């Protein structure tokens, strides 16, 4: 096995192009695959030495709106701790694995690994994130909603590196929340997770984004629900009102971790809970159902 | 290649492939066998070491990543004269050790926590230890030990007292 440790993104792109190697970020997914023998890379390209791919900054480029830019090599722990980032993304990052895993694992690795239950994916979808992909040919930008194509599958070409994740500052200004359910705290892989982001003015919701994970081969936005919620007040939120629109959007499966029916019901509860958190409401399902 | 890094406060160099796992470099290359391997998959935390002060799984860490960085293993936290670290003392006094296999990892996770927060609450201790599995103790005494250690280590605490 060859092990390369480039110190610049250009060097990394060149190495990837010429070697057809495998990118190694924190290694918390890749090292498990190697230990299990499901992946035996000929060349590892360790990107942890590329300083420009780490950290979180707000960039203002001329006429365009400000953007919060997260280096793909930023650790999950750093994302969870960053006050510059919206709640849903920090909460999603905090839900990843254990302290040890969050200290090693990167947000770029979570995105590129593209597990349907990855805990930062739904927050990124709810925040209208864009992914900046780098190759020797230059960069291209892909919307988060278009990035994931199947379980562990993305639009990333073998010679491309995820360099940055960009969040439009407008989406960072909205209220947001992440909710997940798993077997136990710490290490638990989400059985279902949900992230919402919404602008609330005088109790009225607009710019609603709802993303759910582990209920389809890719993390999904629930467009029907987003439309339904737009213009409604937070006081009127109730699980019964969300249920149909949530179930319409999701396509859960039975698997080793839980059943499809369970996942559906839990999704409704999690989406409601996250929306209620955005509205500053006490969550819970104890109040009577109002009709829209 | 020669991997150079700081291990337990001393500059070391060891012959290893950059794709070797740090757990193997420590145990086989440097004979620091206090770091344990349980699952080898990032799930049990028995292999926890501190990398630049932060707990990480040595079974998922490749040698090429520790070049020029600071690694602390369980062998590195006792005093120069061999006196135990207050967290080690608290684990012994509280009865937080049964078979002991998880203990090095538990203690290093606890150390990383107490280096950040002087007086953590139960929830913070539990969160800090979420990546460390124990098959023996039921965790209650481990949490008690970390809380006891935090009281002993708190600025102004009487070290001999408890
Ligand atoms: C015990 C355990 C518990 C876990 N719990 C959770 C959990 O609760 N939630 C969760 O979401 N995940 C969890 N994970 C999975 C993993 O920790 C995360 O997905 C992590 O964010 C991966 O990041 P990494 O830097 O370690 O990726 P790596 O393992 O380095 O890489 C993952 C994949 O992405 C590719 N890649 C990485 N970075 C880039 C890049 N910049 N450009 C192109 N390709 C790239 C690699 O080639 C590889 O295929 C867990 C893992 C373990 C071992
Ligand atoms: S041996 Fe490393 S986490 Fe279990
Ligand atoms: S004391 Fe035996 S595993 Fe913890």
Image (cartoon, coloured by chain):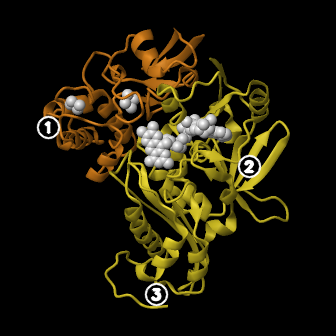
Chain colours: A yellow, B orange
Is residue B86 visible to us here? no
Checking the image for residue A24, the label placed there is none
Is A168 drawn above or below residue B88 in the view shown? below
**Protein chain holding label 3:** A
Distance from disc 3 to disc 1, alpha carbons, whole Å, reads 55 Å
Secondary element at tag 2: strand
> Could you tell me which residue is drawn at 77 percent across and 65 percent down?
A65
Q: Residue furthest bottom?
A: A291
Q: Position of residue A100 (x, y in %)?
A: 43, 38
Checking the image for residue A236, the label placed there is 3
Relative to B44, is A12 on the left or the right? Answer: right
Checking the image for residue B162, the label placed there is 1
Ligand 3, by image quadrant, is top left
The N terminus of chain A sits in image quarter:
top right
**Protein chain holding label 1:** B
Asked whether the residues under the numbered discs 2 and 3 touch, taking CB atoms below 8 Å apart as contact, a structural biologist would say: no
Near mark 1 (Cα within 10 A), the count class, few <14, some 14-19 or many ≥20, is few
Q: Position of residue A231 (x, y in %)?
A: 59, 86
Distance from disc 2 to disc 1, alpha carbons, whole Å, reads 56 Å
Is A65 drawn above or below residue B131 in the view shown? below
Asked whether the residues under the numbered discs 2 and 1 touch, taking CB atoms below 8 Å apart as contact, a structural biologist would say: no
Give the residue at mark 2.
A132
Name the N-terminal-most of marks 2 and 3. 2
For the residue pair A208 and A226, the one nearer the viewer reads as A226
């Amino acid at each position: 096995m060859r092990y390369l440790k480039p110190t610049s993104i250009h060097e990394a792109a060149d190495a990837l192009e010429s070697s057809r190697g495998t990118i190694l970020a924190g290694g918390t997914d890749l090292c498990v695959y190697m230990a299990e023998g499901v992946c035996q890379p000929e060349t590892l390209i360790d990107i942890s030495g590329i300083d420009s791919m780490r950290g979180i900054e707000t960039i203002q480029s001329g006429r365009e709106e400000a953007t919060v830019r997260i280096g793909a090599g930023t650790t999950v722990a750093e994302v969870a701790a960053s006050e510059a980032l919206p709640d849903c993304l920090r909460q999603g990052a905090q839900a990843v694995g254990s302290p040890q895993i969050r200290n090693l694992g990167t947000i770029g690795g979570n995105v590129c690994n593209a597990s349907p239950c990855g805990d930062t994916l739904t927050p990124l979808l709810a925040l209208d994130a864009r992914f900046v992909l780098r190759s020797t040919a230059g960069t291209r930008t892909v919307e988060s909603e278009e990035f994931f194509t199947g379980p562990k599958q993305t639009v990333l070409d073998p010679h491309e590196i995820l360099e940055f994740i960009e969040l439009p500052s407008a989406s960072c200004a909205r209220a947001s929340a992440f909710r997940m359910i798993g077997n136990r705290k710490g290490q638990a892989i989400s059985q279902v997770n949900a992230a919402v982001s919404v602008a609330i003015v005088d109790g009225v919701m607009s710019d609603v984004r709802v993303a759910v994970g582990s209920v389809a081969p890719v993390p999904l936005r629930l467009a029907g629900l987003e439309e339904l919620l737009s213009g409604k007040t937070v006081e009127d939120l109730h699980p019964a009102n969300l249920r149909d629109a949530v179930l319409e959007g999701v396509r859960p499966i039975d698997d080793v971790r839980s059943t499809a029916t369970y996942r559906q019901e839990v999704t409704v509860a999690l989406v409601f809970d996250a929306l209620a958190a955005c509205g500053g409401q006490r969550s819970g399902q104890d109040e009577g159902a109002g009709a829209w | 290649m020669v991997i150079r890094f700081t291990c337990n406060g001393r500059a070391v160099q060891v012959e290893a492939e950059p794709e070797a796992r740090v757990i193997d470099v420590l145990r086989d290359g440097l004979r620091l066998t206090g770091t344990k391997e349980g699952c080898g998959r990032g799930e049990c935390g028995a292999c926890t070491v501190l990398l630049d002060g932060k707990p990480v799984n040595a079974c998922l860490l490749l040698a090429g990543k520790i070049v020029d960085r600071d690694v602390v293993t369980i062998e590195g936290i006792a005093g120069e004269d061999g006196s135990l670290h207050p967290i080690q003392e608290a684990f012994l006094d509280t009865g937080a050790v049964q078979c002991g296999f998880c203990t090095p990892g538990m203690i290093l996770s606890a150390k990383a926590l107490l280096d950040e927060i002087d007086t953590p609450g139960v929830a913070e201790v539990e969160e800090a230890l979420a990546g460390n599995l124990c098959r023996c103790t039921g965790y209650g005494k481990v949490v008690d030990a970390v809380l006891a250690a935090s009281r002993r280590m708190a600025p102004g605490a009487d070290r001999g007292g408890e």
